[in-house]
Amino acid sequence: VGAEGFPGMSKKGELSLFVRSLQVLSPCLHMLPKKGLKDQEIRYRQRYLDMMLHPEVRDTFVTRSRVIQLVRQFLDERGFLEVETPILNSVAGGATARPFVTHHNELNIDMHLRIAPELF
């Protein structure tokens, strides 16, 4: 990484560099595929590569991001509060569907994927 700026003291009295511009100096060691990405599996697993090679895919992600941003802004302006709820629970609950079960290695317990997010 290359940085341009001027030296100075931070608010805590530490010697710092106040950066005006940053530049990535390392080269890319992998060549882009010449014929594009045909394999759907690679396109899903390496989205960054898919977006570099297919501008329409990148445009879709940009549009999706803008829509989510606008919906959040709309609801925020009206006093709504965004709350994150857990996806995995130790007890199955919610709808009558058969729950997906996975194992949490660190906690050494089975966990169930939440089926009905509106019930939390």
Image (tube, rainbow, N blue to C red):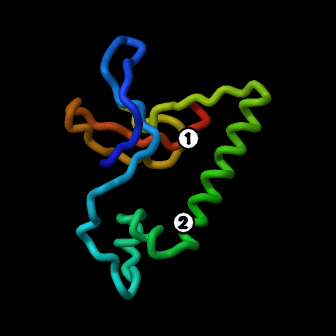
Tell me: 61 left or right of 24: right
Q: Earlier in the sequence, mark 1 or mark 2?
A: 2
Three-letter residue code for mark 1 = Ala
Tell me: 103 left or right of 36: left
**Residue drawn at the location 36% of the way across and 72% of the way down:** 41
Which mark is on residue 58?
2
Which mark is on residue 73?
none
Question: Picture coordinates of residue 74 (x, y %)?
Answer: 76, 38
Image quadrant of residue 9?
Answer: top left
Which SS class for mark 1?
loop
Locate the C terminus and report the quarter of the image it occupies: top right
**Residue drawn at the location 60% of the way across and 66% of the way down:** 59
Question: Picture coordinates of residue 111 (x, y %)?
Answer: 33, 37
Which is in the foreground here, disc 1 or disc 2? Answer: 2
**Residue drawn at the location 39% of the way across and 68% of the way down:** 49
**Residue drawn at the location 26% of the way across and 41% of the way down:** 103
Cα distance, mark 1 to mark 2? 31 Å
Tell me: 91 left or right of 68: left
Residue beneath label 1, please?
Answer: 116
Which residue is nearer to you in this view: 30 or 72? 30
Q: Is residue 75 above or below residue 25?
A: above
Question: Picture coordinates of residue 93 (x, y %)?
Answer: 48, 35
Image quadrant of residue 82?
Answer: top right
Three-letter residue code for mark 2 = Arg
